[in-house]
Image: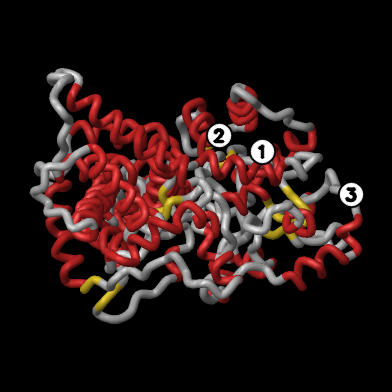
Amino acid sequence: MSFIPFMLFGMAVADMHGQSSFLGKRPKVHADSIRAELAGVLAEVLGHGHGVSKDRLGNINATLSPMFKTLPKNNLGHISEPIMKYAMRRYFSATHAWVVKGFEEHADIVIDSGADILQSKVPGFVRSALEQQFQHQGFTLNDTVAMVAVVETLAFNEVVRGVELSFHLNSFGTDRILSETEVEELLQAYLILEILEGANTDVEELMVDKEKVHARYPNWHNAMMFLADVSGSDGFGRYRRSNPFVAKTFHFEDVVRMAGRISEEFGPWSSYECHEMKDILIEKDIHETGRVKLSEFYDNGEGWQFTEPSEHLRLSGSLDESSSQLGPQVIVPNYIASMSNCITSAPFFSICCLNECDLIYEHIEAAIPYPEATVAQVLEAVESLPTFPTVSPRMSAILEQISQLGGGSIPLHGRLFAQWLHFAFPRDCPYPHAAGTIASMLEQAGPDAEGVKMEEIKQHARAPYAALEPSPFAGADMWDFEETVLEQSTPSDLGDATFSQALRLCAQVAIAGAFGSVLVHEGMKLMGTSSQKNLQEYSL
């Protein structure tokens, strides 16, 4: 992995120079204890206990509701398990900049083994436990809200454990009455331990991490301002009606509350670091194709940024190799949204760069509250964006082709529409690779790669394509018409289908019976007429 402002430099720079890594390893947690905790959380959330407030559930509902309206549904109006996972990914990315472990787009290729599991696999228990209750008939909006609430509750429980560890490593008892300075020390320790993956078992190692963090994490000063804002706003809320001449004091639960805000807000707050990284790349993207030549990707003037080897970029889906003439190109939104730019720290989630395409989806979903749309509806929704692109005749024609493939409508959450958005917003929307492509590549990926070797950088710099000017047609060869839509049916649909088939068969039998009776009746009339005629002829 490379070091970027959003990550700890120790992940690449220290490794490249043979230094020790800043990152610590998480202890394993026995599966039984995880299941026991999950059972309690499920009881609180699904039983409407006191673990999650009505306001919290209401806020989750309000965020999910507009998207839920647009999602494809089964015969009961519920969403399937794959679509639920999609909604979960969108929710946590947009609200907390989280990628929840176990709900990633390609999470199904990860296989757990053994009685002991890493805490990062816990959401898998959430999914399996709730699927047992909801999978047959699908998930309602309230069911999906419950899924989100369970994960957030588990994450908050982990915050409590992280704060307890910070108290322990600072030699504070949890019953200690704290000063503002002591709270600052505890929050710094929490940020290093829980967000930046510092050593979490030894007091001396924590002290070393604190001493080196300024050099290892260039934005540490800004992070301290973030902590000051969190503690300051929390203190203002607590003391605005108290005596201003009395010294402020804090308790364990106050630190837990502030630490919870850090976990929830650090991702969106630190998104400016992702924007800085993106700005460096798009300066080289003069034709707004959302692509930068790999040779220029490495030639950024900084030794600590953009140091992933090409194989790592390829496996993460961030490399466009569709044109042998133009050479390999880094797809900017795919790279920014890739896991290499996440802080892989918290047990249940990674903090990653915000996917800016989600904002575009939200706008379109607000304008078109249905799973499918016409070409005219899509164009009207896109053109009503605050900064809408000029939709070329070619892009309009492609939209028409997508509509024709969809029988006259465009699935808003299908791969082809996501691909169309990528070419309409090439700097904001990631290119959606064909189903199974990234999963198969991820299976080939081993441990996190070290930084790119200087020899590879020189190799790309000497290649013929490095001398070419950036092309306005970069990425054009990546367009294809391979559609993929999330499965919207559930097992309950099979029952409904069987019942419907039975009704249809009964109706067909009834129609056939009625038609048969008509034939019999008409046949009897015909036979009667014929017999009477024969009788008359015989009489003559």
Q: Which of marks 2 and 3 is nearer the N terminus?
A: 2
Q: How far apart are marks 1 and 3 (CA)?
A: 22 Å
Is disc 2 in contact with disc 1, using a CB cutoff of under 8 Å? yes
342 displayed left or right of 144: right
Q: Which of 122 and 126 is in front in this view?
A: 122
Quadrant of residue 260 in the image? top left
Q: Residues within 10 Å of mark 2 (few under 14, many from 20)?
A: many
Q: Which residue lies furthest to the bottom in this view?
A: 114
Q: Which of marks 2 and 1 is nearer the N terminus?
A: 2
Q: Which of 250 and 330 is in front in this view?
A: 250
Q: Distance between the residues labelled 2 and 1?
A: 9 Å
Is label 1 in a helix, a strand or a loop?
loop
Give the residue drawn at x 77%, y 45%.
284
Q: In this view, does 436 lie above or below 230?
A: below
Could one spot residue 510 in this view of the protein? no
Give the residue drawn at x 52%, y 29%.
363
Q: Nearer the viewer, residue 493 or 38?
A: 38
Quadrant of residue 395 in the image? top right
Residue depth check, mark 2 versus mark 3: number of the one nearer the observer: 3
At label 3, the amino acid type is Glu
* Residue that carries the numbered disc 1 in the rendered image: 425
Could one spot residue 210 in this view of the protein? yes
**Label placed on residue 469:** 3
**Label placed on residue 360:** 2
Q: Distance between the residues labelled 2 and 3?
A: 31 Å
At label 2, the amino acid type is Ile
Which x, y percent locates residue 292? Answer: 75, 51
Which x, y percent locates residue 34? Answer: 20, 66
Q: Is residue 365 above or below residue 445?
A: above
